Image (cartoon, rainbow, N blue to C red):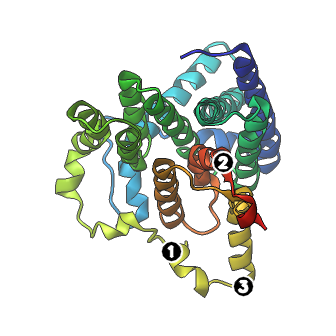
Amino acid sequence: MKIKTSEITLFIFSFLVLFFIIWKTNSYLINGAEEIYVKNLYNTYILSPNYEFIFVGNDEDRKFFRKFNLYFLSYLYLEVSHFLHFFKLDNNLILYFHYSLISFTLSGGIFFTLKCVEKISNENLHVIWIYILSTTTYILVVGGIYDEFSHFEFFFISGCLYFSIKKKLTLFILFSFFAVANRETGILTFFIYFLLNKKDLRNFIVSISPIIFFIVSNISFFFEYPFDLSKIIFVSSKPNLTLLDIFSMEKKKFLGSLLYTLIIYCPLIYCSKNYKIFTNMNYSFLFFLYLIILNFGTFVGNIYPQLVIIPFISLIFFGKKIKNSTQVN
């Protein structure tokens, strides 16, 4: 993977911009409650050998599939806490490590998305970067850091997309395994490699590797889950509402939630008048696949998971082609 000096500079600048945004906005939100926030960063129970996941019969049970992420982060933050304690430093400094980790994954997602768009567009590198960074920043500021999975998924999915385009089998498998370990929607990386590469036996085996990893690593779930599977496929924990419930919402909440999300897609909507925006069938399929999964798999008003669609919406946006003059007029 060839990396230009300008791309490294943009990665560093992205990291710094996002770090300071996270630091300032989060500092305002948790002012006076830093110690509580730090304690909530890691779960000592999940690190216990006696840990057992308790199913409750709603979408909270999805966290069973995210146990690797939860375990890793709990272990990591606990080790950082021990390090700070050893050197007699303020334990609240762990917050800056937390912000740095989020900034790094977001910057990594921006970097891989930038590399993907470069493959299909002759647009200026900095114009592409500004679009991707602006979209990321909007979701971060408006949506807030709502969960500990979406920024990692953005990083791993954009990496899978790039390594699929570049036909890097080992790196794709590695990133797809990370995506599955992070969140159950990582199995969708199957479609990324399968669609973007030649349809032969070797590539099919590579494509299904994340599905095999998901099944093997969660085999106990399929034998032990005591509830209807629909309970975890759709949002079922009240009072959260999905798009299926949107017309029963209060008018203000309905319009606010709709506008917050639509702003992310406004560039595509605006360009659709004069441009053909769905010019690549494979990228379009991936875009609509993630669009459906993201918007029906989470509750209305939660736009932080929309980070995951940035690689696909960027490819669609910069892959657009102007309509002929008669169509435009």
- Are the residues at dot 2 and dot 1 in contact (C-beta closer than 8 Å)? no
Type of amino acid under label 3: Lys
Q: Residue 98 lies in what quarter of the image?
A: top right
State left or right for residue 34 relative to residue 188.
right
Q: Is residue 65 visible?
A: yes
Per the image, the residue denoted by label 3 is 251
- Check disc 1 and report the residue beneath it: 238
Amino acid type indicated by mark 1: Lys
Quadrant that contains the C terminus: bottom right
> Which residue appears at 59% of the width and 79% of the height?
246
Residue 279 on image: x %, y %: 56, 52
Say which quarter of the image contains residue 88.
top right
Q: Earlier in the sequence, mark 2 or mark 1?
A: 2
Outermost residue on the front side: it is 326
Residue 134 position (above or below residue 240): above
Q: Residue at x 73, y 28 (%)?
A: 15
- Left or right placement of residue 321 versus residue 186 in this view: right
Q: Neighbour class for label 1 at 10 Å: few (<14), some, many (≥20)?
A: few
Closer to the camera in the image, 13 or 270: 270
Q: Residue at x 64, y 36 (%)?
A: 106
Kind of residue sitting beneath label 2? Ile
Residue 87: x and y in percent read: 66, 12
Residue at the spot of label 2: 145
Residue 327 at x, y = what percent?
71, 66
Q: In the rendering, at what x and y percent does residue 242 appear?
A: 53, 72
Q: Nearer the viewer, residue 159 or 58?
A: 159
Check if mark 3's residue and mark 2's residue have beta carbons within 8 Å. no
Q: How many marks?
A: 3
